[in-house]
Amino acid sequence: MKAARSKFTCQGVAVDTTDHITGSASSRLQSRRESSDNQMGSRMILLAGVDGGATKTVAVVGRLDGTLLGFARGPASNYHNIGLKNAAESIHATIALACRRAGTRPKNLETVVMGLAGMDSPEDFRMGRRVADLTRIGKRRIVKHDSVIALYAATLGKPGIVVNAGTGSFAAGIDARGRVIRAGGWGNIIDDEGSAYDIGKLAIRSALRALDGREDRTLLSRLLVRHFRLRTLQNIVHEVYEKPMSVNEISAISKLVAYAASRGDRVAQSIFAQEGRALAKLVSAIARRLKMTRSKPDVYCVGGVFDAGPILMNPFKQELRKSIPRFTIRSLRFEPAIGSFVVGLQEQHVAAQGRVLTNLQTSYARHFGKKH
């Protein structure tokens, strides 16, 4: 049964809020690519892919044959944090810089796919549409949840699951029919278990509870006092509520937790074990819904939290085996902005395979300094 689709259109902006996407077979996409071969009449078709997040914006510009011509990094573009106008200006400036490096102009872009953070409700997608509209770039503008572009950057549209543990957390998966679903990512107040923010929050809580005598003493107490230059640990309450401490500041505490865990601090280790299990449950939820628990799915682990290594990965794998006996952990193929570019290719009925994939890999290595 196909999921109901909810689409807004306004001044050239198309926003798809559904989590279920059914794509054409990759072979049919490839054959259509061969017939079009980058041309619409005599005009070269150019696409842009954007990853708009809470800390930075990344944009790439390329052709239908998969060749990336230019890329750029810019400031944050999460409208929740900086407002609609500033978010649009950041995206516009980043795309414009990528176009300049590609030797073209923004007005020449046929399709722009924007993967934006914080697109968690119909209202968020309405705001995302307004951000896209304000950029005034691209003849067609498409807004996607950032989990979707991370998924396509990992799988290129093939079956698999991606789990992201950065400032926030989420998982997303795609099956053999092209159906896409996601789990988690409901924001730091009510969700985001396994994220850097959640780890930082748990560190503060554990240190204060240790002060009360409710939990074991921990190295985290001393690290927090030193990091924030506090006279006493109690002063961190003022930093959190009165300053107030930002999402990024709390997320940065995760590095202190990783350090404490590496020094054998049991409280810090237990935090990572708890968060590793939470991330595994996100993956398990996706696998069950897509009926992939027995198919040995590829699982792509993305985000800075996974840099903690075995203290996170061991409990993650142990928990995951409870529901998925066999799986393969893989690294992300490309940056998430490439996922937006791949979605743009699909919108033009081009599959990221064969010569297109070769061109994408070669040009990606040239621009990003990474080889795949």
Image: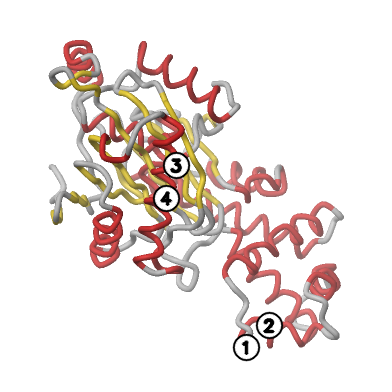
Give the image location of residue 144, x and y in percent: 31, 48
In the drawing, does residue 264 fall left or right of residue 243? right
Local secondary structure at mark 4 = helix
**Quadrant assignment for the C terminus:** top right
Q: Are marks 2 and 4 in contact (CB under 8 Å)?
A: no
Q: Are marks 2 and 1 in contact (CB under 8 Å)?
A: yes
Front tag of 2 and 4: 4
Local secondary structure at mark 2 = helix
Q: Do the residues labelled 3 and 4 touch (CB within 8 Å)?
A: yes
Q: Distance between the residues labelled 2 and 1?
A: 6 Å
In the drawing, does residue 65 fall left or right of residue 372? left
Q: Mark 1 points at which residue?
A: 242
Give the image location of residue 121, x and y in percent: 28, 64
* Residue at the (36%, 44%) spot, across then down: 148
Q: How far apart are marks 3 and 2 (CA)?
A: 38 Å
Q: Name the residue under label 3.
A: 97
The type of residue carrying mark 3 is Leu
User: Nearer the N terminus, badge 1 or badge 3?
Assistant: 3
Q: Name the residue under label 4.
A: 93
* Residue at the (48%, 52%) spot, across then down: 281
Q: How far apart are marks 1 and 4 (CA)?
A: 34 Å
Give the image location of residue 363, x and y in percent: 48, 21
User: Nearer the N terminus, badge 2 or badge 4?
Assistant: 4
Please say which color scheme the image uses.
Answer: secondary structure
Q: How far apart are marks 3 and 4 (CA)?
A: 6 Å
The type of residue carrying mark 2 is Glu
Front tag of 1 and 4: 4
Local secondary structure at mark 3 = helix
Q: Do the residues labelled 1 and 3 touch (CB within 8 Å)?
A: no
